[in-house]
Image (cartoon, grey):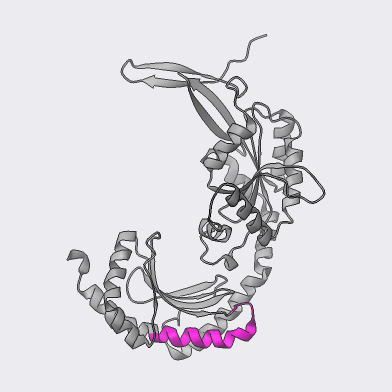
Amino acid sequence: MARKARCKMFLIDKEKNEAISINKKTFQELDFKERKHLQEWICKNTDMLGERLLIIQKEFSGFDDTKERLDLLAVDENGNLVIIENKLDDSGRDVVWQALKYASYCSGLSKADIKDIFQKYLELQGSCELAEKVLSEFLGVEDFSEVEINSEDQRIILIAANFRKEVTSTVMWLLEHNVKIKCIKVTPYELRNQVLIDTEQIIPIKDAEDYLIKIANKKQEELVNKEKKQNRHTVRLKFWNQLLNVMNEKSDLFKNISPSKENWISCGCGYSGLAYEFVVTSNYARVNLLISKLTQEENKQIFDKVITYKKKIECSFGDELDWQRLDEKKASRIAYYLNDVNLFDEENWDRMIGFMTDNMVKLDRAMKSVLSEVFNKSYFNQ
């Protein structure tokens, strides 16, 4: 019986113009452990899994009436919980069953639960950061009250050097039934006391991933219908409809803007990359001028020029504004807030709408002549 060839990688020596064999190894041969090594590598660089993830806990055991522990718990960029199960040289028979159990346990975690889980993880890592802030920044949401997390089905990622047939067969069946699961094959190689790790998504095959998603028509329809029914989207649409009716009686700025399910709507102000915005959350209402051109450098230049007119602008506006250069971000903002109001309390709506529409008109009036001066001076060439 023919021996099965071992996979190899090759290092190309340009000077000698030859290929040097790099032999495949096992984790056992290299004395690598699941928790001490593979798990830590993933925590420190989730690119190993082919995507950007935020690890929020490891060796998580916070399930009622069970002492079971999942390897890693993460959040993806869409706010889905991701259950990550690591194995070394062999996936074992029961890894899918384990992961499905953990996914079912995690399906009951609320947003507050997830925040608390992540906060404990940060503290164990010696970090002083707040879980709310890190989660909001990772998900690209300004206010944690607007974060949507674990609102859809959980995802599963399995990692091993080798997957048994009973595992891959089950995973393929689960994919066909709309369970979000994938298998990452991780292979170690050794060269001159250096270890190389190759990671490859084997299920679903990358080229087929979009196809598998597209054929899940029934599931997609269910998700769309669920989203339409979500209360927060309905509330936002209703609020923006009322606000726009009032705003359009006071100004033509937003006359071509439609209500949105998002927590913000915007309109142009006559200059490319600059926009007026209305923003609402469960904590505040805001009007602002957003400076968001193609580059961070250009946005900071514009902000720095506009702020030289601060006294003139605030005198015209009638109050102090919040000047947010936002050095760590691409955009900058000049804002005015109404705090301690809640979008989801309709009793606040008349006050919010009155504040936002009146002050948007004032903001536009205060900014108009200044923006004309700023852009007419062609300051980029100075």
Quarter of the picture holding the N terminus: top right
What's the magenta bit mostly, secondary-structure-wise? helix
Q: Hey, which residue is sitting farthest right in the picture?
A: 65
Tell which residue pokes out farthest to the top in this image: 1
Whether residue 298 is situated above or below residue 232 in the rendered picture: above
Residue drawn at 48 percent across, 77 percent down: 286
Residue 209: percent from the left, percent from the top? 59, 43
Identify which residue, 225 or 262, lies in the foreground.
262
Q: Residue at x 45, y 81 (%)?
A: 254
Q: Which residues are magenta?
A: 342-362
Residue 208: image x %, image y %? 59, 41
Q: Residue furthest bottom?
A: 249
Q: Is residue 20 left or right of residue 209?
A: left
Where residue 340 sits, quadrant-wise, is: bottom right
Instruction: Choose between 20 and 300: the one closer to the eye.
Output: 300
User: In the rendered image of this protein, does residue 282 appear above or below residue 210?
Assistant: below
Residue that appears at 34% across and 61% down: 294
Where is residue 260? Give x, y as percent: 55, 73
